[in-house]
Structures are given as C-alpha cells and as structure tokens.
Image (cartoon, rainbow, N blue to C red):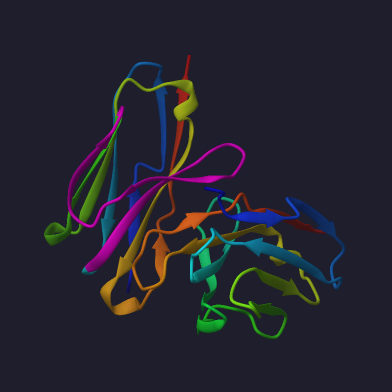
C-alpha cells in the first residue's frame, strides 16, 4: 500500500553536529514537503521539493523522485532545531491528499 | 502576510459532549484542509475543501464529525458526541487554488476528552 517511511525515528545530537534525515516513499509522487514541528506543536514549512536540491541557511533537502526518497540535511545543529521533522508526500494516484510519515524526533543537547 | 488562524488553542471536554473548532485560512487561499494528529503520529487528513465545496472527506468519521465552509473562507469542524479516542491536535491548513500546492498550517487546537 501507499507508505511514507522516515528514518531514524529518534535522533540525539550534540550542538554543532550535522545530521541527515531520510524519507522513503512507496510510489510515484507529484510533490513533497518537509516540515519542522516545534515543541509547541506548530508545523513550520521547511521545503517544498518535488525533485532536485534546495538550501535554506543551515538546512538543505534533496529529492530523488526516480529512486523514491528524499533527504533533509541539518548542519551545525542548534538547540532550537529540536522537535519533530515530518516528510509529507503528494502521491499521483491519491488526488490532492498530502500523506505524512511518522516523523523523526530530534533532540539537540547544549 | 497573516498565517492560518485557529481557535481555540486548547479545549477540555467530557466524553459525549460536543465541541467546535474554527479556522481562518491565509487570505486568497482557495483550498482548506482539516487534519487530525494523534500523539506520536503524523497528521491525517480529515476533509479537504475547494472554496465552499468538499473535495475529499473519505477519512472523516461522518457519524460524529462534521465540517463546513459556507462562504468559502473560514471553516468550522464539529465533533458531536466526542469519544475518548478523539483526543488529538486538530490542525487546519490552506493552500492556493489547485492540486499539489504547498500547504501552510495553523497552530492547531489541542483537544482532550475525559
């Protein structure tokens, strides 16, 4: 069935470290979003990226649609990066429905 | 530009009571979504509106949940009667007209059913 799988489920980093979060999806996609859910529950848009690579400050994302995965890179992590990172996908055969993965919970220690 | 607004932010009710949530999307966004997020999971779509018409409500428990967007702008989601398993965060999102556009989320309403 249609699936969006994120790894790892949990990650603990020391401030300043780099990390890579992965999102695998089971079928062809029309588009993909990465979100950061902060400790107050707000979903913050990070990237809207159907293919290719985008960068925004210390964060960057790469989607390889033909191989059905996307990666989110966080460099020089800060304590404010803590929270849950979600990948969400528009599959071609699911209409306009955005389907979320289970998230990666990141904790950055000072 | 103002973001998606939701109210209330928190609500505690007893089971079998009713509750309503309100959402005002980003100005000019034709598409509005309601999601349910249970603790530890990703958000799940409940209903999608395009202007004031329903596009997808296949995952809305229609025996107890209802939603409307009468004038194609703000929207209300209602639960009547609430069950314990309805405890969750209810998120509203909006996007420009059309499919597969970037969605923007409100702060959510955290519902606790006792």
The reply, left or right, for residue B38 in relation to residue A32 is: right
Does the stretch in magenta take in A70?
no
At 38% from the left and 59% from the top, the residue drawn is B102
Q: On the image, which quarter does residue B20 sit in? A: bottom right
The x and y percentages for residue A105 are 46, 39
At 42% from the left and 21% from the top, the residue drawn is A78
Q: Is residue A101 visible?
A: yes
The reply, left or right, for residue B80 in relation to residue A39 is: right
Camera-nearest residue between A101 and B29:
B29
The reply, left or right, for residue B100 in relation to residue B48 is: left
**Region in magenta:** A29-58
Q: Quadrant of the C terminus of chain B?
A: bottom right
Camera-nearest residue between A46 and A40:
A46
The reply, left or right, for residue B112 in relation to residue B56 is: right
The x and y percentages for residue A107 are 47, 29
Tell me the chief SS of the magenta region: strand
Q: Is residue B42 visible?
A: no
Camera-nearest residue between B44 and A44:
A44
Does the stretch in magenta take in A45?
yes
The x and y percentages for residue A43 are 51, 47
Camera-nearest residue between B51 and A35:
B51
Q: How many marks?
A: 0
The x and y percentages for residue A38 are 54, 38
**In the displayed structure, would residue B50 be above or below residue B15?**
below
């Amino acid at each position: 069935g249609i699936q969006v799988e994120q790894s790892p489920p949990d990650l603990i980093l020391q401030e300043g470290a780099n990390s890579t979060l992965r999102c695998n999806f089971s079928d062809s996609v029309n588009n993909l979003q990465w979100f950061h859910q902060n400790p107050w529950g707000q979903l913050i848009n990070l990237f809207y990226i159907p293919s290719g690579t985008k960068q925004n400050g210390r964060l960057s994302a790469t989607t390889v649609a033909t191989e059905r995965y996307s990666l989110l890179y966080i460099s020089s992590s800060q304590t404010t990066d803590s929270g849950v990172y979600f990948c969400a996908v528009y599959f071609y055969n699911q209409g306009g429905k955005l389907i979320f993965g289970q998230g990666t919970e990141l904790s950055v220690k000072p | 530009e103002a973001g998606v607004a939701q109210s209330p932010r928190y609500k505690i009710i007893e089971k079998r009571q009713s509750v309503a949530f309100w959402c005002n999307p980003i100005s000019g966004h034709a598409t509005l979504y309601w999601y349910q997020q249970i603790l530890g999971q990703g958000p799940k779509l409940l209903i999608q509106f395009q202007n004031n018409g329903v596009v997808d409500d296949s995952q809305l428990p229609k025996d107890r949940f209802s939603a409307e967007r009468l004038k194609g702008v703000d929207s209300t989601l209602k639960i009547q009667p609430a069950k314990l398993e309805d405890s969750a965060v209810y998120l509203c999102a909006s996007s420009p007209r059309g499919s597969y556009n970037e969605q923007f989320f409100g702060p959510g309403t955290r519902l606790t059913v006792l």
